Image: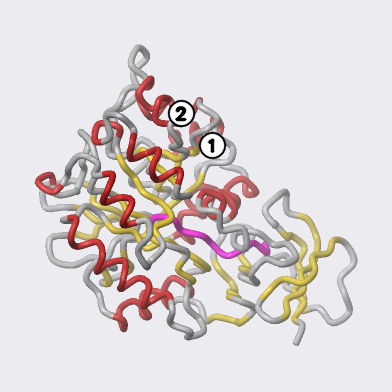
Amino acid sequence: MTTVLASAAVCPPGVPSPGWIAMDGGVITEVGRGRTPRDAFDLGRALLTPAFVDVQCNGVGDVDFSTTDGIGWSRARAVLARHGVGAFCPTFVTAPLDAYPGLLAATSQARADPSAGLAEILGVHLEGPFLGEAPGAHPRDLIRPVDVEWLRGVVRAPGNVCMMTLAPEADPDLAGTRTLAAAGVTVALGHTRASFERALEAADAGASVVTHLFNAMAPPHHREPGVAIAALTDERLTPTVIADLVHVHPASLRLAATCKPRFAAVSDSVGVGPGLIARDGAAWLADGTLAGATTLLDRSLAGLVASGIPVAQAVEAVTESPARLVGAREHGVLRPGARADVLALDPATMALRRVWLAGTPIPLAR
């Protein structure tokens, strides 16, 4: 059955303008501009956008993806859906090498869950253990140099590793970067104090993303610009940012958006359990180290807009841009053939009004 949604502001992404979209069988079948079809559900002045895509999500609420069971996976995916997240990459931080096969198997099993109303799993983002001199909240004793043979095995394992954050310090000959890039895995630079020049060498080898810009990396210096300035000036590198207004100052968000109009936002959300303190929308270790966020991309979009970033660019940062990073072409856009993941937002506050995933209405989070 075809459902038609119309609004005074459709953002596919792009500059919002009056239009409508038709959905049938879980996909978008038509997108139109101007005159509203007679049978359309008119959403008035609501901003119609694609559902959010989160490529760095470690957990939700009290669910940590690295330790939860099948029920926890379903519960977390339902929460993500109710917050407007249509698709995401479960993210696993630094752990012993022999722990990852089990994590990937659990992800593969969760991904096969046919239940409706759940955010789709795009693939795994491994954030570690091949990190550098800015470990942040990662366990330092488990950080290690790149093991190329291990990488070759893990990219073939069930669970579909689609993205990996590593540091050039851990990959001195960049063999790991080249191995991942050749296998179609998105290589992100992060948790590093590598130089500007070293970051460009990593881009030469296939790195294409910089993980959570400004966080867990050397601060920019006018004579030693480092990875942060490489992310903002090299066209091959797309920075991701945590836009909870805790991890990054609004002025720094505006800088990123000005230098890289197609930057991507991530939640870096974590499941809060023992050892973490939740405060002000973020999670902290007892020693004051930031360990991630407790807010999701709905709040991130509002934070980006409140920071002065234009609505169309902010929407792209939480939809099309992250989807593009991991090759998820059916997500993050409103166009024929794309998955019918659609949000209706308050045009003034960016608050969620309605959610459809695969064309099915989803209740909002309370």
Residue 290 drawn in magenta: no
The relative height of residue 104 versus residue 247 in the rendered view (above or below) is below
Any part of residue 295 in sight:
no
Circles 2 and 1 in contact, beta carbons < 8 Å:
no
Q: Can you say which quadrant of the picture contains the N terminus?
A: bottom right
Amino acid type, callout 1: Ala
Q: Position of residue 79 (x, y in %)?
A: 41, 75
Color theme of the render: secondary structure
- The amino acid sitting under disc 2 is Asp
In this figure, what is the number of numbered marks?
2
Residue 24: x and y in percent read 73, 80
| Magenta region, residue range | 47-56
Nearer the observer, 320 or 278? 320
Residue at (60, 81) in percent of width and height: 361
Q: Which residue is mark 1?
A: 257
Quarter of the C terminus within the rendering: bottom left
Label number found at residue 281? none
Provide the major secondary structure of the magenta segment: strand
Horizontal relation, residue 136 to residue 80: left or right: left
Circle 2 sits on which residue? 204
Assign a secondary structure to mark 1: helix
Mark closer to the observer (2, 1): 2
Find residue 348 and report its image quarter: bottom right
* Quadrant assignment, res 2: bottom right
CA neighbours of label 2 inside 10 A, class few (<14), some (14 to 19), many (20+): some
